[in-house]
Amino acid sequence: LTQWRSYADDASGVCVGFQREALEGLHFKKPGGGRAKLQLSKVYYGKDSAQRYFRKLIDVAIDGGVEIWPLAEKCYKRIVSTKHECYKTENEWRLFIYAKALKTSPMVDVTGRRPRPYLELNNFGKDEPLPVSELWSGPTSRFQSDNDEGWKMFVAQHLGNEVLGHINFNSSSLPYIRT
């Protein structure tokens, strides 16, 4: 329920489920050509976990067991994959890309309570459709069945018509009281 409340417009939004195996091999098309691999990472919760991880990395670096750039990449990956322990029930995974590989600036959404950076989904190109496997409507969403024309329009607009037959549509039946 924390994710519905925090990220899905008070449970009226949509949750998108992806195929993990496909995400692990996904590449982003760079402006001007070329491709950059995206990174899929489990999220770690709490500062104690992060501190133990960084201490171990520092010990290895002091012993001369790792070069500086691979060490920096490991640090970056752990930083963007760490969240406060109060969110532990989310059991989240994150998909990210190293800025040096991107060579373009992300877009920024300023419509919510705070700015949020994002990459436009169409930058993955037609040869690599997004590996969406399921869509869930929130407990208070207006989309309630896979026959709903609103669902079909949402998918067509945001994911493309070609994925319509390959996605499982679900509606959350969680009891939910708006805040």
Image (cartoon, rainbow, N blue to C red):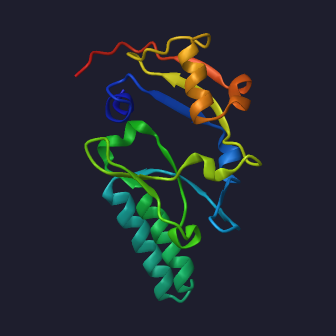
User: At 41% from the left edge and 63% from the top edge, which residue is drawn?
Assistant: 79
Q: Is residue 38 above or below residue 128?
A: below
**Picture residue at 65% right of the left edge, 43% below the top:** 20
Query: Residue shown at 65%/48% (left/top)?
Result: 23
139 to 105, vertically: above or below: above
- Label total for image: 0
Where's residue 104, x and y in %? Answer: 52, 67
Q: Give the vertical position of 134 relative to 43 (above or below).
A: above
Quadrant for residue 50, please give it.
bottom left
**Residue pushed farthest right?**
127
Q: Is residue 179 above or below residue 49?
A: above
Residue 11 percent across, percent down from the top left = 36, 23
Image x and y of residue 89, in percent: 39, 36
Q: Do we see residue 44 in this rendering?
A: yes
Asked which quadrant contains residue 81, the reply is bottom left
As drawn, is 39 to the left or to the right of 112?
Answer: right
Q: Nearer the viewer, residue 4 or 90?
A: 4
Q: Is residue 81 visible?
A: no
**Quadrant of the image containing the C terminus:** top left
Q: Quadrant of the N terminus?
A: top left
Q: Nearer the viewer, residue 152 or 145?
A: 152
Position of residue 140 in the picture relative to residue 155 (left or right):
left
